[in-house]
């Protein structure tokens, strides 16, 4: 995903979107990558998953105040509803997503 496709991929998405802010040089990001990919498959009925390289899309990282990577931000109806920073196991991310979506069910979407 790039800053050019941000609106289509995130802002205008019908499903909530989990955005993985990462960089090529980031070791923990490389560990998180396969986990995020698994979540995109196992939770495809609930969320969309996108990856954003912060080195190539610095303006979006700055817009959302992403200072540490990996950062996973969850968007619903084009607005950030939750974020988690740092590497974690798949189960922790899945719980983060499910709890965040439950808390924000009243958000129009």
Image: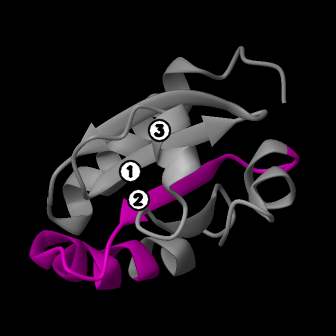
Q: Is residue 24 magenta?
A: yes
Judging from the image, what secondary structure is the residue with disc 1 in? strand
The residue where tag 2 is placed is: 21
- Tag 1 or tag 3, which sits nearer the N-term? 3
Q: Residue at x 67, y 69 (%)?
A: 2
106 sits left or right of 62 in the view: right
Give the CA separation, mark 2 to mark 1.
6 Å
The residue where tag 1 is placed is: 72
Please provide percent x and percent y for residue 19: 52, 56
Q: Could you say which is closer to the camera, residue 61 or residue 28? A: 61
**Foreground mark, 3 or 1?**
3
Magenta residues, as a range?
12-37
Q: Are marks 3 and 1 in contact (CB under 8 Å)?
A: no
Q: Is residue 95 above or below residue 108?
A: below
71 sits left or right of 55 in the view: left
Please provide percent x and percent y for residue 58: 49, 54
Give the CA separation, mark 3 to mark 2.
11 Å
Q: Neighbour class for label 3 at 10 Å: few (<14), some, many (≥20)?
A: few
Judging from the image, what secondary structure is the residue with disc 3 in? helix
- Tag 2 or tag 3, which sits nearer the N-term? 2
Q: Are marks 2 and 1 in contact (CB under 8 Å)?
A: yes
The residue where tag 3 is placed is: 62
Q: Could you say which is closer to the camera, residue 34 or residue 62? A: 62
Q: Could you say which is closer to the camera, residue 102 or residue 80? A: 80
Which quarter of the image is occupied by the N terminus?
bottom right
Give the CA separation, mark 3 to mark 1.
14 Å
Q: Is residue 40 above or below residue 83?
A: below
**Foreground mark, 3 or 2?**
3
Q: Residue at x 22, y 82 (%)?
A: 30
């Amino acid at each position: 995903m790039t800053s050019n496709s941000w609106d289509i991929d995130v802002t205008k998405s019908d499903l909530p979107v989990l955005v993985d802010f990462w960089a090529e040089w980031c070791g923990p990001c490389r560990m998180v990558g396969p986990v995020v990919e698994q979540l995109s498959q196992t939770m495809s009925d609930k969320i969309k998953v996108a990856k954003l390289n912060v080195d190539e899309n610095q303006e979006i990282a700055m817009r959302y105040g992403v200072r540490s990577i990996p950062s996973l931000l969850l968007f619903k109806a084009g607005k950030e509803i939750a974020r988690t920073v740092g590497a974690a196991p798949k189960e922790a991310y899945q719980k983060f997503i499910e709890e965040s979506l439950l808390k924000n069910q009243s958000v129009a979407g």
